[in-house]
Image (cartoon, grey):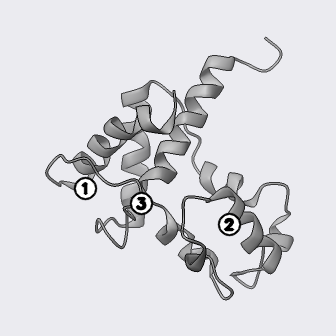
Amino acid sequence: MDIQTAHPVVSKVICEALGRDIEALALSARLIDDLGAESIDYLDILFRLERAFGVKIPRGQIARDARGELSEAEFSRDGVITDAGLARLRAHLSEVPADGIRPGLKMADIPTLFNVETFCKLVVKAHASRQAGPAGA
């Protein structure tokens, strides 16, 4: 499975969760700024994606993936993303325009960066993990 394969179903799920007419959403459509989602909607969207694709997406996965190998202290200080954290976010959220990931970005603002492609990537990763099976199998 790839992003293009996941995209139509992810669009449908997002539209259903947000009570919008079903439409093909642009991969770049931001859930909060463009589609009017609230952060609480993310849990509903993740639950619906798990059902639609038969995968498990651990809560907080985007944040853990975004932080990568950086410790919490290396990633942010006093709620503001560090330079190392910004570099890691740019690499992990490559679908987000670089000008959205700028100095002064707060931890609380990270969800405003998420777009349709961010959720497609989550589904693709979860699907690949399911295909690989349990570690050591």
> Residue at position x 36%, y 29% from top?
52
Figure label count:
3
Per the rendering, the mark at residue 18 is: 1
Q: Tell me if label 3 and label 2 are in contact, CB under 8 Å.
A: no
Mark 3 — residue?
28
Question: Residue drawn at (63%, 82%), measured in percent from left and top?
Answer: 105
Q: Position of residue 94 (x, y in %)?
A: 62, 59
Q: Position of residue 83 (x, y in %)?
A: 79, 79
> Is residue 66 positioned above or below 81 on the image?
above
Residue in view at x 20 percent, y 48 percent: 23
Q: Nearer the viewer, residue 73 or 97?
A: 97
43 left or right, relative to 25: right
Task: Locate residue 131: give its quadrant.
Answer: top right
Q: Categorize mark 2 by other alpha carbons within 10 Å: few (<14), some (14-19), many (20+).
A: some
Callout in the foreground (3, 1): 3
Of pointers 3 and 1, the one earlier in the residue sequence: 1
Q: Is residue 16 above or below residue 108?
A: above
The numbered mark, 3 or 2, whose residue comes first in the sequence reads 3
In percent of width and height, residue 61 lies at: 62, 48
Residue under label 2: 90
